[in-house]
Image (tube, rainbow, N blue to C red):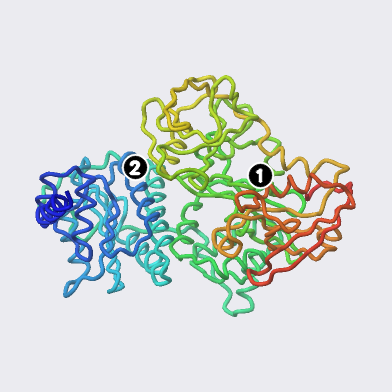
Amino acid sequence: MKSKLQIFLVSLIILCTSLDYIYAFSSDNLAYKIGMFLKKGKVPPRRPSQSRYCFDFSGVVPKDVVRDIDGYGRSLREEFDIDFVVIVTPSIPGEDISTFAADIFSKWEIGKETKGRKGILILIAQEDQKVKIEVGYDLESIYSDLYVARVEREILEEFLAQADWKRGFLATIENFIERTYHMQDKGVNVRGVTGTARLGYYSGGAGAKGTFDFGAALSKPLPQTQQDLRKYFGAQPTPELAFRRYMEFCARNMKDYTLDLFNDRTKFFFSYWPTASGQRRSEAEEWDGLSYEVRQKGKWAVVFHPDSDYMKMAQHPVYLIEKTDKGWQMDLDAMARGLSYGGRFVHWVNGAWLYPYVELFMDDYTLKPNTACLIRKKTDVGTFGIYFLGTGLYNPAEPGVHIGVWEKIQDKDRNGLRTGDSIVSIDGKKVPRGREGERIVTRYLINNVKAGDRHHLRIWRGWRFIELDVEAQPVGNDSFSDFRRCLAVPRVWMGVYIGMTNEEEEKYVNGPSTVVLDVYPGSPADKAGLKRGDIICKVGGKRAPYDELLPGQFLKILRSHKAGDRLKLEVLRNLKERKAVTVVLEETEHKGYY
């Protein structure tokens, strides 16, 4: 038996020495896997798979990044008929990367399956430290030479120079996606773009010329001395001026986050969090000519784009601004923790509904539970009342995407959904695993669900499939109920606002935890020596189940105590010092803070 197996394996290796044979007998998926294995270190003359979009012939791109790029590629193909390909190769010996990119673009026929020649190639020569972005002819009116050169220089090269593959790739792709939507919003039918050229190749390395206007802010003369420049980009007298000055900061592609335009937590955040100039410039472009509304109460303010269509409103960030002793300063640290920009929509993530900034929205807005986007109250938009659990607590090999159920909204007895279920399909549309599945579910819920509508879901539960007809529920009117509790008096408090740790901080505390956003002067937390930015690692010497101490879990612990109780905390300060802090809880009549 062993001998037969050996003979079979040897025969298979011989048969697979040519990619032509692979394509002749294999499925697309098997051809991709075998081809990538055999051709590691060398870009083959033919594209290994038409259904994949990231091809790492160097073996250096993390698997989760490959999956994300493949997911973005599928989304661009489905929505805009664009073929988006990323190639990473060790080197290009003896060849100019521009020539090589144009040659591979043609040989791989990138964009061939689209209606037109709508292909994009990002080519990385790892050892050569070279980058080239190639755009098909029919997309050159969308992605001009000037735009592409800026993305190469200001996003990809800057991130790759820091060996940050993940942020470099994903920031580049997200920038292309945002550019695509921006052009569509200007009235360009991106999906319908086609060309009439009858050329034997798909890209020639040149494109249409264009201009890139960052708005009137760029025409202002800047102060000439360093002292005056720092004052110009310092704390501002109003939140609107802080926002406008930040837009100018981005438009001018400035990189100094030590300026007093930013609060202390933001300064510390950017001391370890890398950024690229292309991201800043795109941020300014996005807001050029866009209307905004400023809301302010006490020391907290927000700037956002109001729109009767919540999907349009959710396409732009909500800016958080704090008033300190210096003046109004941008709170980009809280934004980075609480607002996730994915699938082209801004989502409020775990713990963000505990921020003091939500008080500025809670009278006329709520969050749509399945997308966590701001939406006006009393709307006909429906929800399944679900959120995504990810794969941390479940077998990542199971099909679909795992969900949790907001029982306040979702009638589980009538619709049958349970926390831990995995959605495999919606109305017959297949839902794959991972982030791509989450994007499909989110997009479907945004575009197709009205209150009272019924939808057919196929669910994976307990090693079997279940068919459910689910009725969409009205959106709840009080997503910020947890925040309202800090406004009730009298109550027991320690005097903090809290949020969730970011990706970098979690490396130091072994998983998601709670971070202190602000401490009220004279409160129990202030008396105990707790500081802004402290990460709460343990309460009473213990962490929560699953080795996590999320903001919601921390509040449950806090609310289980009474005035006079001593709450023993272990905190991490400045990502360096571990400190023991004991907070003696008090009863308060103060409205605000937990």
The percent position of residue 35, horizontal first and vertical second, equals 19, 54
- Toward which corner of the image does residue 566 lie, by quadrant? bottom right
Question: What is the number of the mark on residue 472?
Answer: none
The percent position of residue 81, horizontal first and vertical second, equals 28, 41
Residue 92, compared with residue 513, is above or below; it is: below
- Toward which corner of the image does residue 127 lie, by quadrant? bottom left
Q: Which residue is mark 2?
A: 188
In this view of the protein, can residue 581 be seen by the observer? Answer: yes
SS of the residue under disc 1: helix
Check disc 2: other Cα within 10 Å, few if <14, some if 14-19, many if 20+. some
Q: Which residue is mark 1?
A: 353
Residue 100, compared with residue 83, is above or below; it is: below
SS of the residue under disc 2: loop
Circle nearer the N terminus (2, 1): 2
Residue 380, compared with residue 329, is above or below; it is: above
For the residue pair 207 and 450, the one nearer the viewer reads as 450
The percent position of residue 61, horizontal first and vertical second, equals 35, 61
Check disc 1: other Cα within 10 Å, few if <14, some if 14-19, many if 20+. many
For the residue pair 372 and 250, the one nearer the viewer reads as 372
**Number of numbered discs:** 2
For the residue pair 195 and 387, the one nearer the viewer reads as 387
- Residue under the point 58% across and 25% down: 412
Instruction: Report the side of 115 relative to 223 (left or right).
Output: left
- Disc 2 marks which amino acid? Val
- Disc 1 marks which amino acid? Trp
The percent position of residue 263, horizontal first and vertical second, equals 67, 64
For the residue pair 122 and 493, the one nearer the viewer reads as 493
Distance from disc 2 to disc 1, alpha carbons, whole Å, reads: 36 Å
- Residue under the point 29% across and 70% down: 130
Which marked residue is nearer to the observer: mark 2 or mark 1?
1
Q: Residue furthest front?
A: 1
